[in-house]
Structure formats: C-alpha cells, structure tokens
Image (tube, coloured by chain):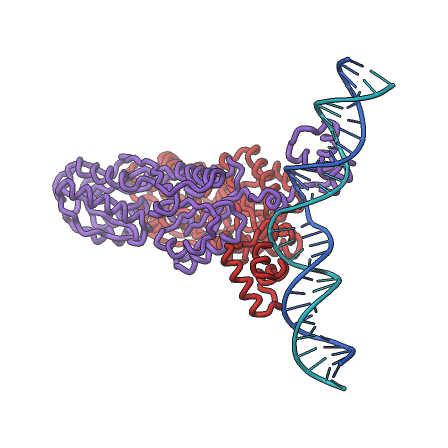
Chain colours: A red, B purple, C blue, D cyan
Amino acid sequence: MADVAKLAGVSSQTVSRVANGQAGVVESTREQVLAAMRELGYRPNSAARSLRYGRFNTLGVILFGLSSTGNSRTVEAIATQAAAEGYAITLIPVGVPTQDNVLGAFTRMGELAVDGVIVIIEVHLLDAATVALPPAVHVVVVDSDAGERYPVVDTDQADGARQAVRHLLELGHPTVWHIAGPAESYAAERRAQAWRDVLEEAGRPVPAIGRGDWSAESGYQAGLSLPPSCTAVFVANDQMALGVLRALNELGRSVPGDVSVVGFDDIADASSYLPPLTTVHQDFAEVGRRCVEALLEQISAGPGGPGTDLVPTHLVVRGSTAPYRGVG
Amino acid sequence: MADVAKLAGVSSQTVSRVANGQAGVVESTREQVLAAMRELGYRPNSAARSLRYGRFNTLGVILFGLSSTGNSRTVEAIATQAAAEGYAITLIPVGVPTQDNVLGAFTRMGELAVDGVIVIIEVHLLDAATVALPPAVHVVVVDSDAGERYPVVDTDQADGARQAVRHLLELGHPTVWHIAGPAESYAAERRAQAWRDVLEEAGRPVPAIGRGDWSAESGYQAGLSLPPSCTAVFVANDQMALGVLRALNELGRSVPGDVSVVGFDDIADASSYLPPLTTVHQDFAEVGRRCVEALLEQISAGPGGPGTDLVPTHLVVRGSTAPYRGVG
DNA sequence: GTTGGAAATGTTTGCGTAAACATGTGTGCC
DNA sequence: GGCACACATGTTTACGCAAACATTTCCAAC
C-alpha cells in the first residue's frame, strides 16, 4: 500500500480511501491512485483488514463427507448464499466420525479465521465436542437434535416420513416395511420413529426394521432380507432405495407390481431409476439458505436462543408405488 | 493475549512462545500461562498471525457445483488432504457458468485470504478470467486444458475412454455408439475423441454422437434416440448411463442381452444399477491429493512450470456388458 | 483583504502477533 | 569471590490497514 501511495504521490490513507470507495477523494487523485494500483498489481491484504475490523467475513462448515446424501447440495447452497452476503466458506471435513476427529475439527475450527460455524454432523458426537468449541463462536446446527443448545435448521424429516408411509397405506397396503439409516443418525431415527408412529396410529402391525448405512450397497443387502409377505417398503434415502430396487429385481419381484418402494431425498437421479422412484423431496437449498441467514443474524445481533427451524418436505409420486393387489 | 499475559504474570512474548510450543519456557511458567489461557478462553487471532507471517494457510477452490459428477468427491479429497497439511479450504462456487460469473469469482478470490487457488472449471471460461487473476496467486487447474499456462492435474480421460471402447469391441460388437457430455466440457470432448480414435484405428464405422448434460434425465433422452442397430454404447458418465439404462428398458431392449452399456466415473451407486454398471473408475481422491500437493509445492518453492499430471483410470467390468450376439 | 468554513488530504495510532534484540538470573568454573 | 556463559524472560518493533484526529487548500461572503 505504501508503494502505491508513493507512486501516486499521495498518503497511504488516501489509497485506503480509494480502495474502499469512500467519498472525499477528488476525481483526479482517485484516477492517479487507481493507475498506481494497477501498475503495481496491488491487492488489499485481507489479513490486515480482518485484524483492523475484527471480522473475517468467513463462515466455517464442519461436516463428515460430501459424498454422502444431500450434504453436498446443502453445502453448495450454503456457499452460494454466503457468497451473496459477502462471506466465504471454509470447509472442515471430518473423515471418520470418531469422537477424537470431531474434537479435532472443533479445535482446528477454533483456531481458524471464521466468524461463525455451521455444523452438519450428528449431535451425539457434538456433545463431547461442545466443551472444545470456544464460547465466542456462533453456531448453527443442521439436521440434529441440538435444539436446546444451539439454533437448528432442519428438514422436516418426521413429516416427510409420515407422508411417505401414509401414501403407501392409502394405496391399500396392509402395512409398510422400513429400511432405516444407521442407528447413530438422528435423521434416520426420526424417519424411523415417524414410520412407526403412523403404523401404530393406523393400528397396523409394525414389521421388523431393516438397517443400512445410506449406501446403495447396504440397501441392496437389506432389500434381500425383505420377506415375501412385504408389499410396501419405505426406505430412508434414495440411494438405499436404489439398492432395494436391485434386490427386488434379483428376487424376481416386480416394482411396483409386487412391491411398492418409497425413498427419501429426491436426488436428481431418482427420477431415472427403474422404475422412477416415488420419494420425499427435501429442499436442501432452502436449508442452506436458512442456515446462513440464521448465522449472520446471530453474528450481527448476538446469540439468538436455541430452537428449531423446520423446512417443509413433500412427497413426489413417481412410478415405484402402486395400489395393493395382494401378496405376490 | 495481553490479558493472558497479565493474568499469568508474564510478558505477552512468553504467552506467544507457549502458544506456539517453542522451547525456552520453563515448565512452571508454561503451566501458569496455559492455566490463564484456559481461564480466559483465549484463542490466537489468526488474522494477526496471517498478517505477521504473510501467509493464510488457506487454499481457495473455484468450482461450478458440488452436485455434479465427481466434483464433490474431488473437493472432499482436496479438503482432507489440505487439512492434513494444515491448510483450510475456502469454497468459491460459481452458480451459472457465465463468463461474468467466473470473472467475478476470480476477482473475489483475489481479495480473499488464500495462498493459492485450485480451479475446477472449464478452461474456455478461464481464458477470459486469466487477466483478472492476480499474478501473485498460485494456481492449479483440474480437468482442463490449461497445460500451457498452469499446472494441471487430471484424470487420464482418454485412456479410460479407450479402455471402455476396446472392451466393447473385444466383446465382438461391430461398433460402439457414444453419448457424450456437453460440448463445452473439455473432459467430455476428450472422452469423445478417444472413442472416435479407437473406432477409426479399428476400422469401424463411427456412428452419430449423442449428447447430454451429464444428468440422468439427459441420458434418458439421448438413450431414447439410439437406433435399433445399436448393440453397444459408451456413455460419458455414470449418471447419464443410468438414464440410458432406463431408456433401453422402456424400449424393451435388455441390457446386457441386447445392448451393452459402459459408463464413466464409477460412482458408488453404479454397482447397484440394473444391471450393475460396467464403468471406468476414476480416482477422485488421488486427483484431489495431487492438486493440493502441487499447489503447496508451488507455494513453497515458487511457480513450477505448466504441465499435466495424469491420474490413471481403469475399467471395472460388471453386469452391463456382454458378448455380441447379433442385432436384437 | 480578511475571515469562516467546507472539502481534500496527511499524520498518528492501534488492531494481535512474533521476530529480533535486550535484559535479567542463575549455574559452574577457575 | 568473581567471571563467563547458558538459559529464561521482557521490550521493541513491524506486519497492512483504516479510524480518528490534524492540517492544508480553496472558495465565498463580507
């Protein structure tokens, strides 16, 4: 900056004024400064800026993996929204979700140049990590049950699951099987709980639950274990549903002729499955948007109380569900 | 820091030494300082650190979208590798790939606190943006043809495509159709070129090319246009291949009985398609790893020359390809 | 011609950190 | 006992920027 000032024949303060577009600089001076900036390839040092202002204009995102589920779409929405608000996004991936790793991520985040943190992570791991999170850091949690400690933005998992199960019951199926996500996942548990609730409310038998790890392969394995009496399955995400479709195909049971299948997420590919998958649409973009909003609100206005902001879901009916016509 | 120093009854310099784990601090003093740090919830200000050191320990990643193809896996690998090296990742998403937006991203990146930039973006858009990128910023490009200006890390697209097409020819198919990605994509063009080359070398007819936009839906559309004479298709990515499988299913042609299909990417779901997809495996993690390595090398040792670092691919044979048995 | 005041520009200062240098404080050796 | 030397700790300074305050310049009104 000093070099620019010297070349333009002005003080560094004037350079600063020009750089920030402040008023009170005469046009001719401004021109000279801009010319000098160009000549020297000057760009402001954001570290010094941050130091001066006490803010980084950066948000941190702690997450497990981008490959899984809709995480990547949420992150993308967060990044887009943050960019629109003049913030950058810093990613802290936690490879294997051990407690140590999560603690490490929080510690690292504490040392990072961020004004706030969005946590996309299962909360039981968060418990232990809470201690490590500096109290001054603002936090918003996605998809978790931290409602008592932090603001939470979440998809309305329970409602989506209810819609899915009711849809199958309305088609006449005597009951609905369920292939859940990992037991450690709060989202998986809520979907499973809603499934159970609807069945019990309707006075239907509650079949044994299946489990997968969100991957198509695990859905395939779980699908192979479905009994012949099963005519309707609610699968906790689309990728596992893909595996279930494959399993049913190998078992010689047609979808939706013999078995109806509903997924969850409405990923882009779901409409191209064989058959196109009936599934629960999640608005990942909206979740990301609200996260950023809530976090910025918190940063500017101080910590808002905990609480949960639910983003609605809706069922998308495609070709994988059909009326009940008896056990094949 | 000053508060910590006062509480511990030492100078701020000693606090600094403790914080950085430097030698030359007696155990008892160190204990006191650490205690004071804990009590005050002290955490070092990274802006000041960056200002002092002239480095940010942050890498920027410019990209289109995380939802597409293997981008998210590459980004994840980049983030993981960077974290291992003590660097954080800042994401700069470019929503719609217009030239303006790309320029904007580069400008923003120039103002951001990053030591280097990894660009995951088509290079024809990069051309215009090059001007805007400050010369002092280190750059590594992924999956593009910037080989003459920047170091490039890339999957060996051409070799992967060759393996795919040769596999189909070896199965006895008279020729191989191709459904390519968007024409603007360099990766898509290289895969298409390799497909054409292999057919021409083998003296086979080169059918008209199909096109999609990488999405399953576009693959479905392209798949519907395949002529009855087609017995083998090489699809430029797995998601489009999923759409092709659906199209062939609707057309009443069996895979692999009537038509063999090969994809590209080997995404996790591909093994659960109906039938499980034969595809070209890309090592996204390795690409991410090498990117970070190359960039850090550049940062520490000065600009390495341009050039391309190719990550090998290999064919994974599953259930979607079978020997030729005449036109169904 | 002087004076007042607004506008343009310059100077000082501090943000939090760590390198470089300066100052203690003790230990061992002659 | 005195001296040298190693080691622990304190003081000064600069990193790049911008707020706060200080100064200069210029014009208008009398």
Quarter of the image with the C terminus of chain A is top left
Taking depth in this image into account, of A220 and A21 the one nearest to the observer is: A21
Measured from the top left, where is residue B66 in percent x and y? Answer: 42, 48
Taking depth in this image into account, of D8 and B267 the one nearest to the observer is: D8
Measured from the top left, where is residue A65 in percent x and y? Answer: 47, 41
- Quarter holding residue A215: top left
Measured from the top left, where is residue B19 in percent x and y? Answer: 66, 35
Q: Is residue B3 left or right of residue B302?
A: right
Q: Is residue A152 above or below residue A108?
A: below
Measured from the top left, where is residue A293 in percent x and y? Answer: 56, 56
Q: Is residue B156 visible?
A: yes
Q: Is residue A257 visible?
A: no
Taking depth in this image into account, of B241 and A203 the one nearest to the observer is: B241
* Residue at 29%, 43% in the rendered image: A254
The mark total stands at: 0
Quarter of the image with the N terminus of chain A is bottom right
Q: Is residue B286 left or right of residue B160?
A: right
Q: Is residue A45 above or below residue B325?
A: below
Q: Is residue A91 left or right of residue A297?
A: left
Q: Is residue D16 above or below residue D30?
A: above
* Residue at 60%, 48% in the rendered image: A139
Taking depth in this image into account, of B79 and B261 the one nearest to the observer is: B79
